[in-house]
Image (cartoon, helix red, strand yellow):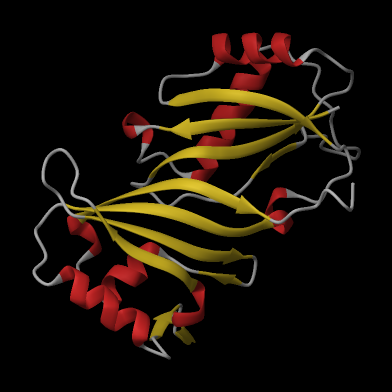
Amino acid sequence: MRIRIIFSKTEIIRFTSHLDLYRAWERTLRRAELPLAFSQGFKPHAHINLACALPLGFTSENDLVDIWLARDMTLDEIYQRLTQAVPPGIVIHSVEEIPYQAPSLQKQLTASEYLVTLLLHEDELAEKLERLQKQKVIMRQRKNKEYDLRPLILEISLLPEDTSGRQQIKMTLKARESATGRPEEVLLSLGIEPTTALFHRRHLILMDTSNNS
């Protein structure tokens, strides 16, 4: 049985690393006493698949983790056990069963949607976003290699200010295994320092695999 958990990573653990988040899920599943399926070999490990690493300092909602169970259980029992075992900072929204042999989350992921909140007011932000969208090429450098950021920006728009009057930008960025857009790089391309912003991942967009299941 393969289960997909939809959860949020909240403010109090936003500086938790991807590896530590994975370990938190391992501890949660043990505390929940779920019948986990384990790999074969010299060092068996539980089958746990987190969708996409979240950079330090980011929060999220609608994040995904898949787990494999050695026997069937009701979704309601799984949800109840998990919500009683999960640590502060992780909020479980729902669980669902998915096909056992479906592709990994990393292979299904196509894009991520972010909400970026600016802590300092940026003059002429709408105009800067418009100019960015008109650019055909946005060359950036990552790990000493140049790449074009422009095709990784699927959508970018200015949202209404939040209740504190802070400017907000919505970004939908490509998130393939070999081509991932980073919201910090988008801000740098706009001339905005990423340390003056809050980053929140709102959605992970998966390809439709219903015809392959």
Q: Position of residue 91 (x, y in %)?
A: 48, 24
Query: To which quarter of the image does residue 23 belong?
Result: top right
Q: Residue furthest front?
A: 160
Residue 82 appears in view? yes
Residue 191 appears in view? no
The residue depicted at 21 percent of the width and 58 percent of the height is: 195
The residue depicted at 53 percent of the width and 31 percent of the height is: 7
Is residue 186 positioned above or below 69 on the image? below
Q: Is residue 45 left or right of residue 52?
A: right
Is residue 98 positioned above or below 140 on the image? above
Q: Position of residue 36 (x, y in %)?
A: 80, 23
> In the image shown, does 63 or 113 lie closer to the viewer?
113
Q: Is residue 43 left or right of residue 81?
A: right
Quadrant that contains the N terminus: top right
Q: What is the number of callouts on the image?
A: 0
The residue depicted at 72 percent of the width and 8 percent of the height is: 77
Q: Residue furthest bottom?
A: 136
Is residue 82 positioned above or below 8 on the image? above
The residue depicted at 19 percent of the width and 43 percent of the height is: 162
Q: Position of residue 10 (x, y in %)?
A: 38, 32
Q: Position of residue 199 (x, y in %)?
A: 33, 51
